[in-house]
Image: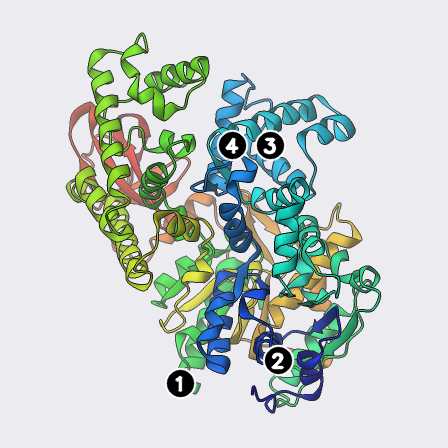
Amino acid sequence: MVSLKSLNSEQKKAVEYDGGASLIVAGAGSGKTRVLTYKIAYLIDKGYAPESILALTFTNKAASEMKERIKELIGTKAQYLWMGTFHSLFAKILRIESGALDFSVNFSIYDTEDSLSLVQNTMAEMNISTETVNPNAVRHRISFLKNHMITPAVFRKKMMTSFIDEKIADVYERYQQRIQEHNAMDFDDLLLKPIELFRKNPKIHQKYKKKFQYILVDEFQDTNKAQYELLKMLVNKEEKICVVGDDAQSIYSWRGADLTNMLNFEKDYNNAKTFRLEQNYRSTKTILAASDSVIKNNKDQISKTLWTDNQEGELVGLIKCSDEKDEAYHITRIIKDEIHNYKRGMNDFAVLYRTNAQSRVLEDVFRREKIPYLIIGGVEFYKRKEVKDIVAYLRVIANQNDEESLLRIMNFPQRGIGMTTIKRMTAFARRHEITLFDTMQRVFEVIDIKERIQKNVKGFRILLDKYIMLSDRLSVGELTRSLIDELGIIKLFKEESSYESLARLDNVQELLSAITDYSTEHPNVKLNDYLQDVSLASDLDLLDETKQHVNLMTVHSAKGLEFPIVFVSGCEEDIFPLSNRFSTDASMDEERRLFYVGMTRAKEKVFVSHARSRYRFGEVAYQNRSRFIDEISSDTITEVTSGSGRKANRKSKKEIYYEYFENVDYVDFTQDKSKHIKVGSRVMHDKFGLGKVLQVIGAGDTQKVSVAFEGNNLKQLMLKFAKLKILN
């Protein structure tokens, strides 16, 4: 019998309720994960079969942690739960039922980069100029339409109002046709296709509606229209659905999240019971009061009053800075003081910002001050070029129709198959209505391709065929290691021996380690299963909380996390809130909710900082402090000084670049272009700014240099065309 003694009275009521639909309004830090965990264990203890419970979480990390906790309560029965993210669980259903939708079980899952590539290729195929229509804007629009369940036909008939809309409708229609031909789905399809499946196949719909006797949803405030539609399709006639969320933490409208799903839940389920978790276990009384004083300025919200038995705690610290560099130095000084005075660890700190662009100056100063840091949610590991290249090989081995992945690897490593050859092969494939993969087998029929290149294509196809055959005989780890060895990728990066190539080599080695670990943990796993996990992975899933580093991330990335000390940086109008010139009340409310999320990540201390001036869009902008600072109750905030910020005297952009290397000894600057460039030379580039040469490769007209520009921006440039000014 599962003991509920550790729960408070309201948590206990929420766990024990089994009378139909229920809404758990869970304030920040109120123990919602604990309630969900105990409710699932309680239901199984009460007689529900684990496989009849569908538990939907916001991240894979949350799902795996919750499953481990449930296992501690009820034992190995927990492994039979259907628990994971919407995307991962409905991808599982789609693989099981793939035949009913004219997909094969090994369909690929396209991330945003793959989708953009398909949009670009589709536009090129349709002769739509990228100067007229921005491919990224088209991809965003297609995703938005899918999130709102709007098909190309409906968009064309009811929403098309301009020439650009007409082009988007054309691309959207062709995009859907191509992605089906590639036996692939994008992230949005993983939610739309199950709806299509259930509508077209009543038997399959009833099968899953009958299977899932109880549905639980975490972070319900961030569900979109398609996700809510799926829930309504699957909930049984007894309305056994429990949703958990906090309207004050709804921060994903730009991704299609619809807060009205939560606000209208009681209307959709007339007999729904509401439970309010109002006791906060995370933050101090002061942090709670300060956060509440901000969020109460939003009008549309579910009423709740958070309280805590935790200590009063320190006032919120307000850091006034002259500029962004001064802000970064203030933050580092406070971190050092906290470590020295209170023996804190580096991972006790999180520095939050509104946009990724704000991290550069923080990174610069952290490096100079020798403070280790980790960027969470920057360029995600599985989206790094060399990692995506290897995963693309695995995707083609699993799904030969995946044209985007095949195009990505056609000439990696270089095998003499250029864009002209690829265009001729693609045209041949379209003309004969066959796949690009099949065209490789018939490459000798493609006219205007030289015999030498035809042999290269044929050799590449033979290599792929070999690994397609081996994929059923080797583990995922053995297959990948063998493939990388045969391609010579490690040797290639070692021989290039540039700063960039060695960083790429590290990433390849890390990928091999990750795949080996995955194969060890899942000995009988199939390649498709591994590729699905990779496609749906995020950097948060890879977060190692035992390593000692300060955490740098956007406020969006911090959702669901907590830290002893939190800095909310860049609290200025037009940054946080992101924009106020044309903002609607709804978007300003969301910015306020985002600020609230940032503050409530903190257990013990919160610091908010703002700068009088900030370098933005290539020029100095003079900033007004954020309205959210003014909304913090005056009795919960106080100005602090670290005593070690750096005063800003605004300089020219070139002087700012020079200052970037102020900790490096170097000789007088000159503009003498006759000097030979060498390792260690300081150079100026019109676009990238000041840099240091790390490596010189080759000689004469083909000579290249690897240069570390400001912000650790690594570039390899052809010296002949780079127009570098040698400064020393």
Name which residue type carries label 4. Answer: Ile
- Frontmost residue, 665 versus 591: 591
Q: Nearer the viewer, mark 1 or mark 4?
A: 4
User: Tag 4, which secondary structure?
Assistant: helix
N-terminal-most mark, 4 or 2: 2
Question: Where's residue 511, x and y in %?
Answer: 30, 53
Q: Which mark is residue 138?
A: 3
Q: Which residue is labeled 4 in the image?
A: 179
| Mark 1 neighbour class, 10 Å CA radius: few under 14, some 14 to 19, many 20 or more | few
User: First in sequence: mark 3 or mark 4?
Assistant: 3
Question: Total marks drawn?
Answer: 4
- Name the amino acid, label 1: Lys
Indicate which disc, 3 or 2, sits on the residue closer to the N terminus.
Answer: 2
Question: Dots 3 and 1: beta carbons under 8 Å?
Answer: no
Residue 46's mark? Answer: 2
Question: Can residue 138 be spotted in the picture?
Answer: yes
- The CA span between labels 3 and 2 is 50 Å
Query: Which one is closest to the eye, mark 2 or mark 1?
Result: 2
Q: Nearer the viewer, residue 620 or 692?
A: 692
Q: Residues within 10 Å of mark 4 (few under 14, many from 20)?
A: many
Q: Position of residue 428 (x, y in %)?
A: 40, 14
User: Between marks 3 and 4, how big is the CA–CA gap?
Assistant: 15 Å
Position of residue 117 in the picture relative to residue 150 (left or right) = left
Instruction: Kindly identify which residue carries mark 1.
Output: 343
| N-terminal-most mark, 2 or 1 | 2
What residue is rendered at 70% in x and 54% in y? Answer: 228
**Relative to 43, does residue 623 appear above or below in the rendering?**
above
Q: Amino acid at mark 3?
A: Val
